[in-house]
Amino acid sequence: MDIITKLADIFSTFPGIGKRQSKRFVYHLLLQDKKFIDNFIASVTELKKEIAVCAECQRFFVGRETEKHICTLCADSQRDTGALMLVEKDIDLENIEKSGAYKGKYFVLGGVVPILEENPEEKIRADALVKIVEKRKPKEIILALSANPEGENTALFVQKILASLQKKLDFTLSAFGRGLSTGTELEYSDADTIKNALVNRTK
Ligand SMILES: [Zn+2]
């Protein structure tokens, strides 16, 4: 395999990037000077060194932020520990934070459960979720998932794995209201849509 194809194959694994676009990235790199390439390589190398996964909410954060492997959101005592919001990915969390509508805690599931998935527990951080719920004992768990079939299937699976804990701890399980129109991905929702979805959440 030649080096152009090899690098293009790597780019084609990125979210939303097809074969043609991945080739364009490679040719773009070929047109850059050495300084750009050195900076690009150094940044990719640093990424894994500097970014850690939060031991509680599982989101990525700059590892030197706190000592105990906990991000600033989880360490912030001003936030409402009675509410735990479950999101699919880091970008969704960032988008909800930007809306300013929510002041509780988060948990990043790290994926969705596709319909007919045979091993759903491998698609999201099921064990870490159970642990954090047992530790925090929230009064309400809010499912903030995209309004599409995968989001709904993920919500069903989460309800299933939390069912026995819910009996024990008696928390409310709520879901983002359909202020999010069908097919909407949280990543692309604006602040007003997120606020409405939170206010109109169903319990
Ligand atoms: Zn955290």
Image (cartoon, helix red, strand yellow):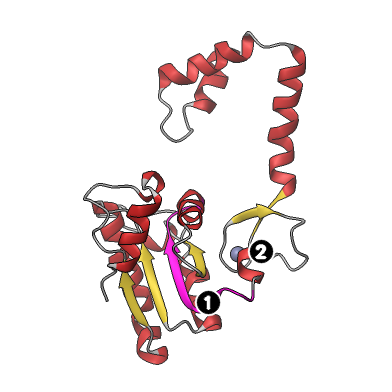
Give the residue at x 75% y 63%.
66
Residue 1 in view, yes or no? no
Quadrant of the rendered structure where residue 77 is? bottom right
x and y percent of residue 127 in the render? 49, 70
x and y percent of residue 85 in the render? 44, 68
x and y percent of residue 130 in the render? 47, 75
* Furthest residue toward top: 31
Ligand 1 under 8 Å from disc 2 Cβ: yes
Give the residue at x 52% y 20%.
8
The answer to which of marks 1 and 2 sits earlier in the sequence is 2
Name the foreground residue: 192 vs 59. 192
**Pointer 2 residue:** 72
User: Which amino acid type is shown beneath numbered disc 1?
Assistant: Asp
**Pointer 1 residue:** 80
Give the residue at x 56% y 15%.
26
Residue 58 in view, yes or no? yes
Looking at the rendered image, the quarter that the C terminus falls into is bottom left
* Furthest residue toward left: 182
Residue 79 lies, with reference to residue 58, above or below; the image says below
Name the foreground residue: 122 vs 68. 68
Query: Left or right of 27: which side holds 182?
Result: left
Residue 58 lies, with reference to residue 89, above or below; the image says below
Residue 61 lies, with reference to residue 22, above or below; the image says below
Q: Secondary structure at mark 2?
A: helix
Q: Secondary structure at mark 1?
A: strand
Q: CA distance from mark 1 to mark 2?
A: 14 Å
**Label at residue 165:** none
CA neighbours of label 1 inside 10 A, class few (<14), some (14 to 19), many (20+): few
Magenta span covers which residues?
Answer: 77-90
Give the residue at x 47% y 51%.
95
User: Which amino acid type is shown beneath numbered disc 2?
Assistant: Thr
Instruction: Indicate yes or no whether the magenta region holds residue 139.
Output: no
